[in-house]
Amino acid sequence: MEKKIIKIIAAIGLIIIALGTLVSYSVSLDKNYTQIGTDMLIEDGEPLTQGMKFEFTIDSENDYIGHIKWRSKSGRAPEFLTGAVMTDADGNFIMACTGDEVAIDTEELHLKKGTYEVALYTLTSEEAANEFRTNYKTGITLGKEFENYSDNTECQMEYFFKISPAVNVVGLIKIILSMIMSIAGGLLLSASFTSGKSSSQVYDERQVANRGIAYKYSFYTLLVYCICAATVDLLGVKLPISIGLIMFFGVMVALGVFVTVALWKDCYFALNDKRRNVVIFLSISLVIFIASLINNLKYGFVEFAAVNVSFIVLFIFTLAVIGIKSVIDSKEAE
Amino acid sequence: MKNLKLKAARAAMDMSQDDLAKLCGVSRQTINAIEKGDYNPTINLCKAICKTLGKTLDELFWDEE
């Protein structure tokens, strides 16, 4: 009873961790970078704050949409445009956009983590707007009447410069699917714990003992592999694959040892497993991985292809061991 | 050491290894391993086999000198 409660708490904990991760991920996607100021002054037709600059820091690389708009503080809406020019820390041009009190144009951009600078321009005439458009190739919608500011004394505006993450439909679907899967997985886990049947019960006592032996061989294989990998690294031998892949292959080798020992000691298939179904599943997975490998090779993603190759090798190896064991079993006379 | 008593008792009841395994809740390979002497079952499994075959522990698992 006590064990059941602990397992239920563990299952709930897993769900909370999964949901927490997803929520934090989705919150980070929603993060906006907004700059609000009140320094856009025009006096006697001349913008006083031309080229005013501010900095902001992007926390995570993502696709974003940038735009600027302004609002008159005096209640009166004079006709002009604002322009914003964004550059990175090295002064490289990133994007430019314009906006007025009603219409804004948005610019899609991909930003890396880092500090960026934005310069603001007040475009009080068609000439100034045209010059800005020519310089920065923005989609300014002209044709509106610019006021003659020579008669104005002063007007003050608030401006809003905003960088918001681009709406990523695929990413959104992935988040929703991940949430559904994590909730369903957690519920299934809880259901399996509360049903009174643990996973070890689907293997008989000899199989459980032999699986322990298989895990032991697998563990020692991984240990030896890690020692060999570390030795190679210490000797300064440069291998043409990344350290991540080296460790991944180690896991695959250990998994291969576990599968082989488990198959040989007849503890790979649980009592309620149908051998044919497992073989069909492995075969279908094999076809998918081969298809994926061909596709990856076509687009040159060698690293993912290498991962697929290891899966293909493992599955072919597993199927071969199953085949050999089946032949041996069939020859066993009762 | 092969457990011929178990094999004989099973054959006497016209049961296959698979039939006995299903009735005892273990795999066929486990019954095969017990008969071949490759695996020493726990007392719980011994009792389950004895009950299924209508024999006592002595009759199936006791080695006479």
Image (cartoon, helix red, strand yellow):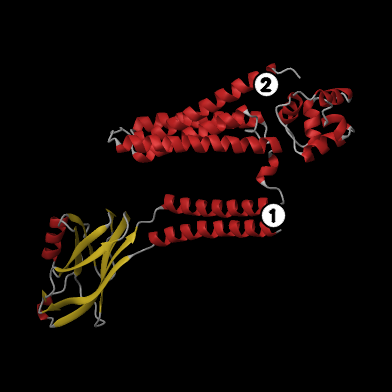
Q: Nearer the viewer, residue A55 or A52?
A: A55
Q: Which is more N-terminal, label 1 or label 2?
A: 1
Q: Is residue A263 visible?
A: yes
Q: Residues within 10 Å of mark 2 (few under 14, many from 20)?
A: few
The relative height of residue A213 versus residue A114 in the rendered view (above or below) is above
Amino acid type of disc 1?
Thr
Residue A254, percent from left and from top: 49, 35
Residue occupying image coordinates x 70% and y 18% = A332
A179 to the left or right of B17: left
Q: Nearer the viewer, residue A116 or A328?
A: A328
Could you say whether the residue bearing mark 2 is in a helix, strand or loop?
helix
The relative height of residue A84 versus residue A77 in the rendered view (above or below) is above
Residue labelled with disc 1 = A194
Q: Residues within 10 Å of mark 1 (few under 14, many from 20)?
A: some
Residue A215, percent from left and from top: 56, 38
Residue labelled with disc 2 = A329
- Name the image quarter holding the N terminus of chain A: bottom right
Residue A2, percent from left and from top: 68, 59
